């Protein structure tokens, strides 16, 4: 629902390809998780060759469409595959200008946005290999490991 | 009258040729397109597992849109289990991806000379070699394709060993556990040597009249969230039916020998959630999240839904829930329909209990009630057609021919399709639905759910009869089933989850007309949608009559007609199926 809300808010149309938040589903191990820009402390996407990217006041990445020549370096640079690409330009979560459509749409209240958000380190993922879709999968696999460990130890949904 | 024509992809597996077409003029998506295509293009009398059968996979104009849970694809072909029209829908995420790739219907003809899979990347469509996937189960096939194509987001609909081996109740499944389960569509896919369909799509669904469309979406959202079952469905999904069925006295314990299961609290929704459920799961764009992920000593997986849960516990007299969950995971992986599989096992157990067959008849497998050996071994040997599994893979009707007339008396199927995990004698609308609908013994064609609620006002509004709201009354059931069938067909065209549209009764023709009108940007009335569904309902009947359907087949197994429910809250309930069927024929204008 977060993908639908995001693509609908920004494009008036629905497809995950248009969404700035993407759900990675590792069905074979029961994990699924939404992946979006975490405004990480490393911000490797800022290595933009045309300097089209900057950091906004909420910590979000701002794209100067005029400067962007759609080379895709930022898409490849994101360690967790959170930068989309559609219609000849990268898609950066801009928090819907504060409206946070995905957060509002999530029926499980699994998403939140906090004003006092601290930058999350993603250094552990800087060496992730593959395309954005694969990087999202690797991120969710690692992040979900404690959850799977808890299942093994007998923790159930209502525990 | 043409409401909308979508893009049709024609895949000739015999010549490895791909061409483009439009969906039929008649129909409003999904099942309606498939049924019209099959009546028009399929020769009567062909072998369902032969090269002349046609497999159609459809989504609809609303699939993958903002409308909640528009997540299903419908697979249709002549059924190898019934010999009549077969079709089945699967939820999950495959259908919206197919829509985003720009394809509304895929029509497979012919047989490939070697195992193949279809790869769709938006407009790019290729038939590829699948020899390395043969023998893999549905999960392994999905993971393998995602890995080798470097796309973990790839959506895959596949068959397992059961489909490869032409088990007549094999499934096509996506997302590892979301099955088009009924009527053996996986066997048809296997007969074509088509192992999987893998799709990646990027093209957005954009409503032509966004304001009108959003309003319809918001209306559905509000109907759903305000529904009195919303929270219970979020928590338990369909497994909540276990308790409801027990309260109504319609549990099929020990293969319909009792409506009371003494171990209910060991196998019910609470027990499942407490002991085995680790996470909620959802299909595309749904806020109910009614599915669950389980973790057991027999492995892990998504499910079970009520049918697998009740089928592998209550129906088989098994009080070991963890075992049943393990079996549910196994049949999903192997690619078997859980309803037919549970029915095969429970029927064998009853045959053994009655002395009709012995363990020696089934390769020495212990067939006592709840037998762990039977529950673990039978799905494996059925899927691989090993030993007695080769016969059981044919379904209960054909297997009974081998075991003799006494075994035949104990089968619970209509037109060859095995029944669900409930006793039709205590729910007259469902009984009629099972007797008359186009795919045989099946409750899910449309759900005559109103009879479970006792809501007379709603029954009056929907079908003009207050008695229809009471499950033990026979009055008004013809109209109720006719309405439920129309709503089911509409849902199979919108491709919305029927647990929402039919079971929660939150979608009606007015709301659907607003959604269609808003998405397509033209005026489509509720009456036009009703007529389109009526037309296709007749198309489906015509298909079956052409295949030789006799009206005498619109009935239930004799064991339900001659004997009342022996115990429990519905004790004494019998069923006058001729009366119900006559009432339904009157509604349809049939003789």
Image (cartoon, helix red, strand yellow):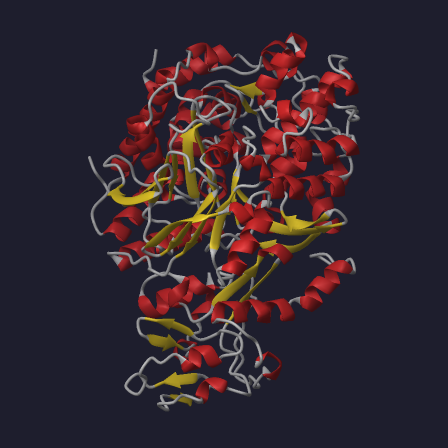
Residue B565 on image: x %, y %: 66, 18
Residue B530 on image: x %, y %: 30, 33
In the image, taking residue B318 as reference, residue B452 lies left or right, namely: left
- The residue located at (44%, 42%) in the rendering is B501
Residue B489 on image: x %, y %: 38, 34
Residue at the limit of the structure toward the front, as seen here: B113
Give the quadrant of residue B311: top right
Residue B44, relative to residue B488: is it above or below? above
Residue B534, relative to residue B558: is it above or below? below
Of B120 and B564, nearer the camera is B120
Of B36 and B214, nearer the camera is B36
Of A31 and A8, nearer the camera is A31
Give the quadrant of residue A7: bottom left
Q: Quadrant of the N terminus of chain B?
A: top left
Confirm whether residue B476 shows in the render: no
Residue B521, relative to residue B2: is it above or below? below
In the image, taking residue B389 as reference, residue A42 lies left or right, namely: left
Residue B470 on image: x %, y %: 52, 26
- The residue located at (22%, 52%) in the rendering is B521
Q: Quadrant of the C terminus of chain B?
A: top left
Q: What is the number of callouts on the image?
A: 0
Confirm whether residue B507 shows in the render: yes
Of B202 and A21, nearer the camera is B202
């Amino acid at each position: 629902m977060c993908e639908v809300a995001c693509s609908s808010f920004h494009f008036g149309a629905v497809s995950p390809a248009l969404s700035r938040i993407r759900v990675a589903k590792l069905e074979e191990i029961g994990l699924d998780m939404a992946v979006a820009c975490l405004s990480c402390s490393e911000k490797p996407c800022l290595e933009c060759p045309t300097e089209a990217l900057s950091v906004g006041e909420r910590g979000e990445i701002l794209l100067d469409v005029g400067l962007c020549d759609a080379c895709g370096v930022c898409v490849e640079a994101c360690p967790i595959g959170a930068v989309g690409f559609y219609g000849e330009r990268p898609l950066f979560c801009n928090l819907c200008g504060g409206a946070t459509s995905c957060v509002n749409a999530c029926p499980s209240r699994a998403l939140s946005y906090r004003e006092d958000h601290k930058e999350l380190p993603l250094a552990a993922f800087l060496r992730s290999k593959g395309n954005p879709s694969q990087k999202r999968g690797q991120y969710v696999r690692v992040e979900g490991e404690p959850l799977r460990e808890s299942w093994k130890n007998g923790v159930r949904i209502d525990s | 009258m043409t409401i909308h024509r979508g893009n049709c992809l024609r895949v000739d597996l015999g010549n490895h040729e791909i061409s483009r077409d439009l969906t039929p003029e008649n129909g409003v998506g999904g099942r309606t397109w498939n049924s019209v295509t099959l009546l028009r293009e399929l020769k009567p009398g062909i072998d369902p597992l032969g090269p002349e059968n046609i497999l159609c996979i459809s989504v609809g104009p609303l699939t993958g849109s903002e409308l909640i849970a528009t997540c299903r694809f419908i697979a249709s072909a002549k059924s190898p289990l019934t010999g009549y029209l077969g079709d089945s829908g699967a939820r999950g995420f495959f259908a919206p991806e197919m829509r985003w790739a720009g394809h509304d219907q895929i029509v497979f003809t012919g047989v490939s000379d070697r195992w193949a899979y279809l790869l769709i990347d938006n407009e790019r469509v290729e038939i590829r070699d699948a020899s390395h996937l043969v023998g893999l189960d549905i999960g392994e096939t999905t993971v393998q394709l995602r890995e080798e194509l470097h796309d973990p987001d790839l959506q895959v609909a596949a068959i397992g060993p059961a489909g490869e081996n032409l088990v007549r109740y094999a499934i096509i499944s996506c997302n590892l556990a979301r099955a088009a389960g009924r009527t053996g569509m996986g066997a048809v896919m296997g007969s074509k040597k088509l192992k999987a369909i893998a799709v990646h799509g990027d093209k957005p669904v954009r409503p032509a009249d966004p304001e009108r469309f959003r309003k319809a979406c918001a209306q559905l959202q509000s109907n759903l969230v305000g529904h009195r079952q919303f929270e219970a469905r979020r928590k338990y999904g369909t497994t909540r039916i276990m308790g409801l069925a027990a309260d109504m006295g319609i549990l099929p314990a020990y293969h319909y020998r009792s409506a009371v299961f003494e171990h209910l609290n060991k196998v019910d929704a609470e027990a499942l959630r407490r002991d085995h459920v680790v996470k909620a799961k959802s299909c595309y764009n749904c806020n109910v999240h009614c599915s669950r992920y389980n973790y057991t000593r027999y492995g892990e997986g998504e499910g079970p839904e009520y049918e697998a849960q009740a089928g592998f516990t209550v129906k088989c007299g098994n009080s070991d829930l963890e075992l049943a969950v393990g079996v549910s995971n196994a049949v999903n992986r192997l690619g078997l329909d859980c309803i037919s599989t549970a029915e095969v096992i429970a029927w064998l157990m009853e045959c053994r209990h009655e002395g009709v067959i012995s363990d020696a008849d089934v390769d020495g497998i212990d067939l006592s009630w709840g037998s762990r050996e039977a529950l673990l071994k039978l799905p494996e040997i059925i899927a691989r057609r090993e030993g007695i599994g080769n016969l059981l893979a044919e379904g209960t009707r054909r297997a009974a021919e081998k075991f003799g007339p006494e075994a035949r008396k104990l089968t619970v199927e209509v037109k060859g399709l095995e029944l669900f995990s409930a006793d039709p004698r205590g729910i007259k609308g469902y009984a009629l639905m099972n007797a008359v609908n186009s795919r045989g013994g099946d409750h899910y064609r449309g759900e005559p759910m109103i009879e479970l609620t006792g809501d007379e006002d709603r029954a009056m509004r929907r079908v003009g009869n207050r008695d229809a709201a009471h499950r033990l009354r026979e009055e008004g059931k013809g109209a109720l089933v006719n309405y439920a069938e129309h709503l089911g067909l509409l849902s199979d065209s919108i491709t919305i989850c029927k647990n929402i549209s039919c079971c929660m009764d939150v979608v009606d023709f007015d709301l659907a007309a607003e959604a269609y009108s808003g998405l397509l940007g033209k005026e489509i009335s509720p009456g036009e949608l009703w007529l389109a569904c009526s037309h296709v309902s007749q198309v489906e009947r015509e298909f079956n009559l052409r295949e030789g359907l006799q009206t005498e087949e619109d009935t239930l197994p004799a064991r339900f007609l001659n004997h009342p429910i022996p115990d429990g809250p519905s004790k004494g309930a019998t069923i006058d199926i001729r009366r119900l069927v006559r009432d339904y024929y009157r509604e349809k204008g049939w003789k």
